[in-house]
Image: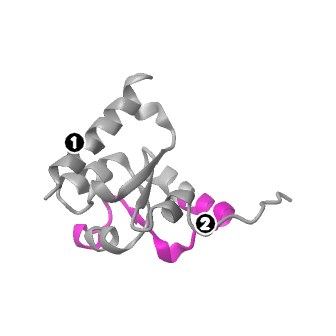
């Protein structure tokens, strides 16, 4: 049996950034579901603090989740579409965890591209 030491209820980023949001990205819905299960069982992130924001979830529901949840599991397409449509405020996103990074562009450029896109979207939301 696997022993998992006690871990905080929310990832470190949520403790350091009380209003921040953490996004776990996976390229397919089945992998997103695996992330949810792993984070719940292994890390202990309470389901009440989380949301799956995939294209199968109504846009109005996703917008409500982005307003009051802290930890998100999403496909990249839905995450970027929600930012583009104003449902997700990229200024609140303090950490992005990328699973199965093969969908990203070639190594080296991927992180810069993702960070650049998040930065540009955050800058465009400044009042």
> Residue 48 magenta-drawn?
yes
Question: In the drawing, does residue 14 fall left or right of residue 104?
Answer: right
As displayed, is residue 6 above or below residue 28? Answer: below
- The crowd level at tag 2 (other Cα within 10 Å; few <14, some 14-19, many 20+) is some
How far across and how far down the image is residue 42, in percent?
Answer: 68, 61
Q: Residue at x 78, y 60 (%)?
A: 4
As displayed, is residue 100 above or below residue 121? Answer: above
- The crowd level at tag 1 (other Cα within 10 Å; few <14, some 14-19, many 20+) is few
As displayed, is residue 93 above or below residue 46? Answer: above
Question: In the drawing, does residue 91 fall left or right of residue 44?
Answer: left
How far across and how far down the image is residue 116, in percent?
Answer: 29, 36
Helix, strand, or loop for circle 1? helix
State the CA–CA distance, disc 1 to disc 2: 32 Å
Q: How is the image coloured?
A: one colour
Q: Which region of the structure is painted magenta?
A: 36-61
As displayed, is residue 98 above or below residue 59? Answer: above
Quadrant in the picture for the C terminus = bottom left
Helix, strand, or loop for circle 2? helix
| Residue furthest to the left | 127
Q: Residue at x 44, y 51 (%)?
A: 95
Quadrant in the picture for the N terminus = bottom right
> Residue 43 magenta-drawn?
yes
Name the one closer to the observer, 83 or 10: 10
How far across and how far down the image is residue 89, in percent?
Answer: 26, 59
Q: Residue at x 23, y 67 (%)?
A: 59
Earlier sequence position, callout 1 versus callout 2: 2
Label drawn at residue 40: 2
Q: For the residues labelled 1 and 2, say whether their Cβ atoms are less than 8 Å apart.
A: no
Q: How many marks?
A: 2
Where, by quadrant of the figure, is residue 63 drawn?
Answer: bottom left
- Quickly name the residue at label 1: 120
Q: Residue at x 65, y 62 (%)?
A: 43
């Amino acid at each position: 049996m696997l022993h998992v030491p006690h871990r905080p209820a929310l990832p470190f980023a949520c403790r350091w950034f009380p209003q921040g949001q953490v996004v776990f990205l996976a390229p397919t819905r089945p992998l997103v579901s695996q992330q949810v299960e792993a984070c719940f069982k292994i890390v202990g992130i309470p389901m009440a603090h989380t949301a799956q924001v995939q294209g199968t979830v109504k846009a109005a529901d996703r917008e409500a989740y982005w307003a009051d949840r802290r930890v998100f599991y999403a496909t990249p397409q839905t995450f970027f579409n929600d930012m583009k449509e104003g449902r997700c405020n990229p200024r609140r996103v303090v950490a992005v965890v990328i699973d199965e990074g093969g969908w990203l562009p070639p190594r080296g450029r991927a992180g810069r591209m993702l960070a650049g896109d998040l930065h540009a979207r955050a800058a465009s939301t400044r009042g």
